[in-house]
Amino acid sequence: MNSGYAAADLRVSDAEREPVIERLQEAYAEGRLEHSEFGMRMHLAMTAKTRGDVAAVLRDLAPVAALPGATAANPTGEDRMLAALSHALGVPTLFVGPLVMMLLSGKRSEYVRRHAAEALNFQLTLLLVTIVTFGLGGIVYAVSWAVAAVAAVVGLTGGPFRYPWILRLVK
């Protein structure tokens, strides 16, 4: 086995491409990229073969911590508790609790903001489904309690959580 390869020469996986694609979408939403440049960079990210290729796509957009392979600081116990609370507050308050958590605690901690935004998007999606189906979507709220409980537990453990099949209206 030859260990003489540089980190930039190692092949990249789909899991390593996902954060790059998310960062490109954020940059496009922030107005940092024009539509044509966004499309070109998305294509380059999807067809990148090495970590160096992927890093080159974000070189002028992201700080070093956002590049694949870099690690972010571990969330504190308070951050984990507030992230779990963001998910749990969605059950009794619908979208109001996660919104308040995102606006107040999200400024202090990126970890709490990500979890609160995810909980907010989940609750807004449930609300829209209920409105569009003239109240029949309210049945989904019973299932949402279990999903919010799982998300709260994941938030307590310090891990990331993404609800499946929701609209991501808030980043």
Image: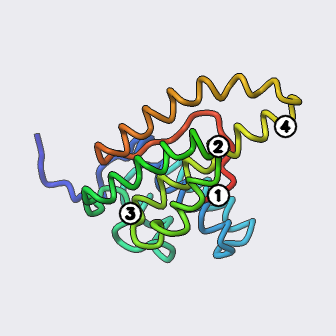
User: Which residue is labeled 2 in the image?
Assistant: 123
Please report contact status of discs 3 and 2: CB closer than 8 Å, yes or no: no
Mark 3 or 2: in front is 2
Q: Residue at x 55, y 47 (%)?
A: 119
Give the structural element (helix, strand or loop) at label 4: helix
Residue most toward the front? 92
Residue name at image x 47 percent, y 66 percent = 106
Q: How many marks?
A: 4
First along the sequence among labels 4 and 3: 3
Measured in 3D between alpha carbons, the distance from the residue under mark 4 to the one under mark 3, in whole angstroms, is: 40 Å
93 left or right of 147 in image: right
Q: CA distance from mark 1 to mark 4?
A: 19 Å
Task: Give the CA distance from mark 3 to mark 2.
Answer: 30 Å
| Residue topped by disc 4 | 131
Disc 1 residue type? Val
Residue 97 location in percent, x, y? 57, 53
Which is more toward the observer, 142 or 70?
142
Question: How far apart are the two marked residues, 3 and 1, measured between alpha carbons?
Answer: 22 Å
Q: Quadrant of residue 2?
A: top left
